[in-house]
């Protein structure tokens, strides 16, 4: 696998969009020009500055260098069905909206192959496709937000979310089983796990990440749990952190990374028996992490008006940080030569 070209010094360029936005105030219509700053450092190409319909993106995935999907929230005009699924057949240069009405924002999308995909979001929403184009809603049996979904084959999959929620399916999502949690507002004064991400290696072995909150003590701790029996039972792995973890990625049964608040990056080389911090060089919230191989990886994050792109070529021993004025929510690594970044306002960047 070819090594990806390293990111060098941060170079910013401004992209101007002349837009006929009508800002109506006291009967006056004002034409305006929107100025958007995006990273254009060596190694990245800006494919899309923003979503043309002012949609928010939360997750992105590709099954090959041309075919990909994004999910998130539609514009305010479609407030009754805000869930958005978009697809691209040109490597992310343009996106088309899938024809499905979803009454909740979507947070994550996962594709097993070019045909089988799932998306999850608020209110327990799960949408699925068996041909990559036509989507239908599935019944999750829960009403709280779902944040992560992962399938190991076209039948066996898992989903996690708020209020201790863990779901499983053995038939592609035609029916979902609530393994734990799933009750809206059920935290109360009891400790509870809020799951943001998960990944499985096979039907039995997987990890989930998020935060454990303790309302009674007003405390919290970074949460990583592992299962070896298909999500029936979970063992908490010690992190030694209080930060909320937003994403987790395992390259194989031994090597894994988790990222989250305050620039947190945790790494394991023994399947999570021990997690050690890596120095990220940023205090921004890191929202996504992915690796092409043992050495080459990326992490992205930020908040409104500020963001960060992190790059490592030595397995996370050192990370190079590139500041961005765009909040980045997802990095998807297909391989060492095909990497995409998604910004919350619909910005799409691709590795050169």
Image: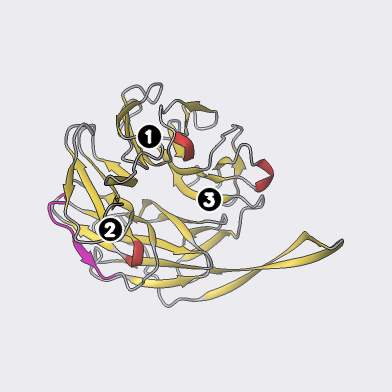
| Residue 275 part of the magenta segment | yes
Secondary element under disc 2, as helix, strand or loop, is strand
Residue denoted by label 3 = 57
Secondary element under disc 3, as helix, strand or loop, is strand
237 with respect to 10 (left or right): left
What x and y, as percent, mark residue 282? Answer: 36, 72
Real-space CA distance between mark 2 and mark 1, rounded to the nearest whole angstrom: 22 Å
Point out the tag, 2 or 3, that comes first from the N-terminus. 3
Residue occupying the point 40% across, 75% down: 8
Crowding around mark 1 (Cα neighbors within 10 Å: few <14, some 14 to 19, many 20+) is some
Q: Range of the magenta residues? A: 271-279
Front disc: 2 or 3 = 2
Tell whether label 3 touches label 2 (CB within 8 Å): no
Front disc: 3 or 1 = 1
Front position in the image: 326 or 235: 235
Residue denoted by label 1 = 183
> Does residue 190 lie above or below 203 as drawn?
below
Front position in the image: 147 or 335: 147
Residue denoted by label 2 = 219
Front position in the image: 216 or 46: 216
Secondary element under disc 1, as helix, strand or loop, is loop
What x and y, as percent, mark residue 212? Answer: 27, 50
Crowding around mark 2 (Cα neighbors within 10 Å: few <14, some 14 to 19, many 20+) is few
């Amino acid at each position: 696998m070819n090594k990806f070209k390293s990111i060098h010094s941060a170079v910013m360029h401004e992209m101007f969009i002349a837009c006929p936005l009508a800002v109506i105030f006291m009967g006056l219509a004002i034409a305006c020009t929107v100025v958007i700053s995006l990273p254009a450092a060596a190694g990245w190409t800006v494919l899309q500055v923003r979503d043309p319909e002012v949609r928010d993106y939360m997750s992105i995935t590709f099954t090959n260098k041309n075919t990909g999907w994004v999910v998130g929230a539609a514009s305010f005009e479609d407030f009754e069905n805000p869930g958005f699924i978009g697809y691209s057949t040109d490597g992310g240069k343009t996106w088309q909206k899938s024809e499905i009405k979803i009454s909740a924002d979507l947070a994550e999308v996962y594709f097993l192959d070019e045909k089988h995909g799932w998306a999850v979001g608020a209110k327990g929403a799960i949408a699925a496709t068996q041909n990559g184009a036509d989507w239908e809603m599935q019944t999750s049996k829960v009403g709280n937000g779902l944040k992560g979904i992962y399938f190991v084959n076209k039948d066996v999959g898992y989903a996690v979310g708020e209020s201790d929620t863990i779901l499983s399916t053995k038939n592609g999502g035609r029916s979902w089983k609530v393994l734990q949690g799933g009750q809206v507002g059920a935290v109360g004064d009891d400790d509870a796990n809020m799951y943001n991400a998960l990944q499985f290696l096979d039907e039995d072995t997987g990890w989930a990440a998020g935060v454990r909150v303790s309302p009674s003590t007003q405390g919290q701790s970074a949460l990583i749990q592992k299962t070896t029996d298909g999500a029936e039972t979970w063992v908490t792995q010690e992190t030694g952190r209080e930060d909320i973890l937003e994403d987790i990625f395992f390259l194989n049964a031994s090597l894994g990374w988790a990222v989250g608040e305050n620039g947190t990056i945790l790494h394991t080389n023994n399947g999570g028996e021990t997690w050690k911090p890596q120095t990220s060089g940023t205090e921004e919230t890191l929202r996504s992490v992915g690796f092409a191989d043992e050495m080459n990886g990326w992490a992205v994050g930020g908040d409104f008006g500020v963001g960060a792109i992190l790059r490592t070529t030595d397995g996370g021993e050192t990370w190079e940080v590139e500041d961005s004025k765009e909040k980045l929510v997802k990095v998807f690594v297909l391989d060492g030569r095909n990497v995409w970044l998604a910004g919350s306002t619909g910005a799409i960047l691709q590795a050169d």
